[in-house]
């Protein structure tokens, strides 16, 4: 379930943290909440979303980071006109799996990335969007 939502970088990077039992429906609902907040406080050129699933009850269940489920969550986020990258924090996903999904995400123009912690997520976003360094 959704545990916390906050701006990591005000108006530019929004984070949802999930804990306990987490479903794809929970992620979609969290995405709708993110879009509402992005519509109120989001700033151009892009607003990036970080979905932190690291505190979920079953870290060995990788269904949340399957490409079809990521696409379902992104569909909600992409309703926002300045939607940027979606970064999923999943420390239990293997390095190889993240690499394959990253390439697939790029190839399909899906603009998502999977990483292991918040620091890596912010570092990745700063590399992808150089305007973040001027706002943080």
Image (spheres, rainbow, N blue to C red):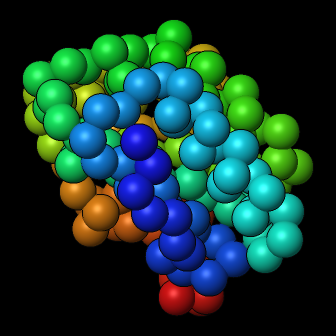
> Which one is in front, 3 or 134?
3
Residue 115, quarter of the rendered image: top left
Residue 69 spot, x, y in % from top left: 50, 17
Q: Is residue 5 above or below residue 71?
A: below
Q: Is residue 114 above or below residue 101?
A: below
Q: How many marks?
A: 0
Residue 28, quarter of the rendered image: top right
Query: Image check: 19 left or right of 32?
Result: left
> Which one is in front, 92 or 6?
6
Q: At 79% from the left edge and 57% from the top edge, which residue is drawn?
A: 36
Q: At 56% from the left edge and 54% from the top edge, which residue is drawn?
A: 49
Q: Which quadrant holds the N terminus?
A: top left
Residue 42 spot, x, y in % from top left: 77, 70
Q: At 20% from the left edge and 19% from the top edge, which residue is drawn?
A: 61
Residue 127 spot, x, y in % from top left: 44, 63
Query: Image check: 106 left or right of 38?
Result: left
């Amino acid at each position: 379930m959704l545990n916390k939502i906050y701006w990591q970088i005000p108006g530019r990077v929004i984070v949802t943290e999930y804990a306990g039992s987490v479903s794809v429906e929970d992620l979609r609902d969290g995405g709708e909440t993110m879009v509402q907040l992005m519509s109120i406080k989001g700033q151009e050129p892009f607003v990036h979303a970080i979905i932190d699933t690291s505190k979920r009850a079953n870290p060995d269940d990788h269904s949340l980071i399957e490409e079809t489920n990521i696409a379902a969550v992104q569909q909600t986020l992409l309703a926002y006109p300045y939607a940027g990258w979606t970064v999923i924090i999943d420390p239990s996903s293997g390095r190889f799996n993240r690499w394959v999904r990253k390439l697939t995400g790029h190839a399909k123009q899906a603009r998502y990335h999977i990483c292991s912690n918040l620091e890596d997520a912010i570092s990745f976003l700063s590399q992808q969007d150089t305007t973040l360094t001027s706002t943080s």
